[in-house]
Structures are given as C-alpha cells and as structure tokens.
Amino acid sequence: MNVCELPPAGEAREVVCSGRLICIANSNGTISAMDNVCPHRGGPLGQGIVEDGKLICPWHAWAFDTKTGVAVHSPNAKVEVYEVKVEGDDVLVKL
Ligand code: FES
C-alpha cells in the first residue's frame, strides 16, 4: 500500500492486504491497522469514522480504541490490531 492511499485524519478505509480485507484508520495522523469485521454483528469497520482515537463502527456505533482494539464499552469486545510501519512511500502492515 502506498502512503497516498492512506485515509485522511478522522477517516478509515478498507484495504486488501495479503488477500485479507483490513481496516486502516487515521487518528490525527497516527495510522493504525485492525480487523475489518466488527465483533458485534460483523459491520465493516473500514467504513466507519475516527474520533478521539476511537474507530466508530458504521452500523451501531460501537467504538474501538485504535491502538489496542478494545471496545470502549466492554473490555471483552476487541478487534485484532496489527503493527503498521511507514517506510518511504510504502505502508507496511504486519498481519
Ligand atoms: S456491527 Fe459494529 S456496532 Fe454493530
């Protein structure tokens, strides 16, 4: 993935990475990568928005910390978060 494809601050995007659809989120310039499937009912997290370091699911507004993947309302609900590195123009996600 190229840095040009990154979502702007406050937005998220669905991206195919090694054959898997993941969610890339931009929280005030900090990029995170996480599973795209919401643990609530399977909503597409990459179609959500980012507010105050939380990715908000577009379906029923569950909020997940973009650093830890933990849901704000319940520590038992969590999405996998992946390591992201920007090297030059390349965005590398470790799945
Ligand atoms: S599917 Fe994500 S909050 Fe319901």
Image: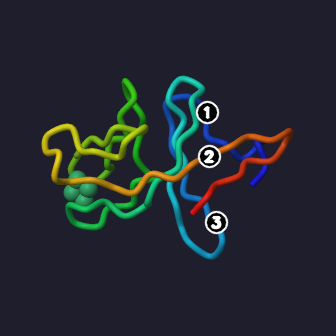
Give the answer, above or below, for where 86 lies relative to 20: above
How many marks do you count on the picture?
3
* Labels 2 and 3: the sequence-earlier one: 3
Q: Residue at x 73, y 48 (%)?
A: 91
Q: CA distance from mark 2 to mark 3?
A: 12 Å
Q: Element at badge 3?
A: strand
Height in image: 20 above or below 65? below
Which tag, 1 or 3, sits closer to the chain's start?
1
Local crowd size for mark 2, using a 10 Å CA cut-off: few (<14), some (14–19), many (≥20): some
Amino acid type of the residue that numbered disc 2 sits on in the rendered structure = Val
| Residue 8, disc | 1
Amino acid at dot 1: Pro
For residue 60, above or below residue 22: above
What residue sits right under mark 3 in the picture?
Answer: 17
Q: Quadrant of the N terminus?
A: bottom right
Residue 18, image quadrant? bottom right
Q: Taking 71 as reference, is 53 above or below it?
A: above
* Label placed on residue 51: none
Do callouts 1 and 2 mark residues in contact (Cβ within 8 Å)? no
Mark 2 — residue? 84
Picture coordinates of residue 52, whole percent (x, y): 37, 24
Residue 63: x percent and y percent? Answer: 27, 41
Amino acid under label 3? Cys
